[in-house]
Image (spheres, coloured by chain):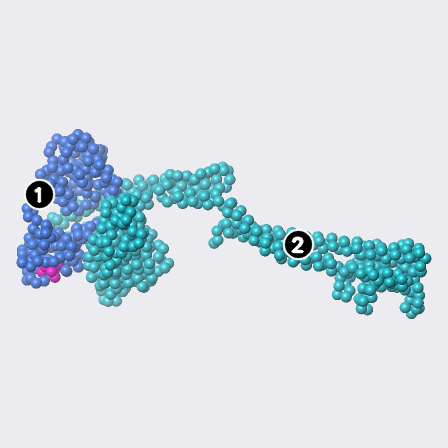
Amino acid sequence: MPSIRLRLTAAYTAALVGTTAAFALALWVGRGASKYRELQRYTSAEANVVLRMMAQAQMGGDTLIQVRDSLVGPTLNPKLAAAFDALPEYVVVLDTAERALYLSPAARRLDGADLETLTHTARRLDTDRLAAVLTVNDEEILAVARRGEGVAPPVDRVVAGASTSAAALSGRELVGTMLAIVPLVVVLSIGSAYLIAGRAFRPVDRIINELEAITDGRSLHRRLATEGAGDELARLSETLNEMIGRLENSFGALRRFTADASHELKTPLTVLRADVERAMSAGSGTTEQLVALEEALQETTRMSELVNSLLTLARADEGRFDLHREPVPIAPLAVDVFETAHILGEDAGIAVTMPVCEDAVVMGDRMRLRQLFLNLVTNAIKYTPRGGTVELSVRRREGETVAFAVRDTGIGISAADLPYVFDRFWRADRARTRRVTTAGSTTGEGPRWADERAGFGLGLAISNYIAQAHGGTLTVQSRLTRGSTFTVVLPCADGTGAEEGR
Amino acid sequence: MKVLVIEDDPTVGQFVKRGLEEQRWGVDLVADGEEGERRAGSESYDVVILDMRLPGKSGLQVLQGLRARGFERPVLVLTAQDAVDAKVQTLRAGADDYVTKPFAFEELLARVEALARRPRTLASQVLRVADLTLDRDTREVRRGDEVIDLTPKEYAVLEYLMRHAGKVMSRTLITEYAWGYHFDPGTNIVDVVITHLRKKVDAKHERKLISTVRGVGYVVKG
């Protein structure tokens, strides 16, 4: 879906182009009608000239009509006829018997049928009517008739006609002009429409930016400005402010719940754990009882870890990711994690290597960094089938950063799932565990872990928060069935200038 | 050596009391903040263990009250808050150390001992089971005359088992000791390390020191 601004631009442009086209059409039609009126005046004037010339000749004593040949009938005085021949258009002089006394050169050039049409129209043309349009010689002409007043009979009337092509041509000219103008109009309207739409949406953009700043979870006490009271945007801002208020309230409630839950959940867990540990250390139970106690202890530990994870994420949402910062050398930490990874890999039939381990010091929380690295490593081993490899590496990078990367040849993550990997409660397991277990069973072995259960789906979310809280990033590249690479990039504390910055 | 435990939850209180008594500490258990503050002021204790969440007067108030009246003995705080700011707050209020709930007794004991500057239960830093010795200062491990080379995790697991020689130690506790809290106890990691330890410690000897208790954990005994 294109942005509203683009859609508005398109709508404005369409409206402007449509209006221009309608205007051009109206202009064309109006211009055509006026052309016909002009043409009519012109032809009437021509007929009047003919009549006046005949009247003058008559007053000068010339004979108008002469009969040279009884077969042809009466014709116009040749002197007059020669004068009329200079007229450019169609001129026909009729006598009272409706015979053509004179045909202008244009009329004489017409073939029989067309001449017949012309003379027929001339004969029929009522002199009261203004004009008639007829087609001769593939050409539309407009004809008018004038009665021969002041001219002695047998001259009855004069018919003058002119081609309408002059009027029609002006239409084509208009179209040509339009074709040249339309692209210009389109470009101009797109430009101005884009600017207008942009202006109209500037307040909306401002609201969006402010909202983004407010809803990052830390500034919920802020509100949108509601100037320009009464308009739609002010009302929108007010509604959004109400929503933010509600959000602020519910986040406040969540915070209080978090604090309460930390006690309400941890205290019973402490009691449970104390009971179990005490029963175990009593040393008086049977082995069966010890097994049950060990299971209970394990579950208690898992529960505690879950509560801790939930609290960690709840605090991270509030923007309080507490770190106990100290200079942490990354290489020894990576070596420690590598040993654990190696042991897990041995159990899972996976070769774990660490070909590169460059040293770097990060200002950070040792426990959290260890948790982050262990999370990535255990995940990689969990989702890599027997016989695969997991490669760890620690590399210094340009710009004073250090990258801890875990590359596996595991089952990978589909492109559709990749964007959700760091969402909490996203369970790679839903898609992944089943396949790992199946792969394991083909080799005739049970599930990978002693207690094959999917995690809570919080590990990667927490890992991501840990990386971000250290001013770093956690990224993943993956291809289904080919494996994944998780990379943590952290800023170094021991580089040039980096230490002074702290 | 005497400890005052101010903890309103009877199970946690009893757990701490008995655990410490087993280590030959004298323990007084008080469930109320006011009462605890009074007892701490009137009797001489080597360490005070104080729960932060108490009915009535809170742990923080008790702590501030004690310090305000010039109480100088070390105070170990039990807290459910693992947020750094909460910990910093208790330390600023005068606590010497803290343990986050839920805690392993092992950790609590180690911190109480450190605070009381009490000499370790074992005079020597050398742990001994039959002809297997582990020196906690030099981190040297020997079986008879032979020096055994262990990785850090193998060392941690063996040290834990030898410290509790003769007792069955659960896999969960071993995992927690060697890998910390943020590690899934559901993995086989302890079993793999034990396999390594058996190869290094027991394989060449007729007398096996490491034995398995199925479904529970492992025990080192002579």
Q: In this figure, which residue is indicated by the disc labeled 1?
A: B119
- Secondary structure at numbered mark 1: loop
In this view of the protein, can residue B162 be seen by the observer? no
Q: In this figure, which residue is indicated by the disc labeled 2?
A: A25
In the image, A216 versus A141, the foreground residue is: A141
Q: Which residues are magenta?
A: B197-202
Q: Is residue B199 rendered magenta in the image?
A: yes
| Mark 2 surroundings: few (<14), some (14-19) or many (≥20) residues within 10 A | some
At x 32%, y 56%, the residue is A476
In this view of the protein, can residue A168 be seen by the observer? yes
Amino acid type indicated by mark 1: Pro
Amino acid type indicated by mark 2: Leu
The picture quadrant where one finds residue A245 is: top left
At x 24%, y 59%, the residue is A356
Whether residue A469 is situated above or below residue A140 in the rendered picture? above
Q: Main secondary structure of the magenta part?
A: helix
Q: The numbered mark 2 sits on a residue in which chain? A: A
Q: Position of residue B195 (x, y in %)?
A: 14, 60
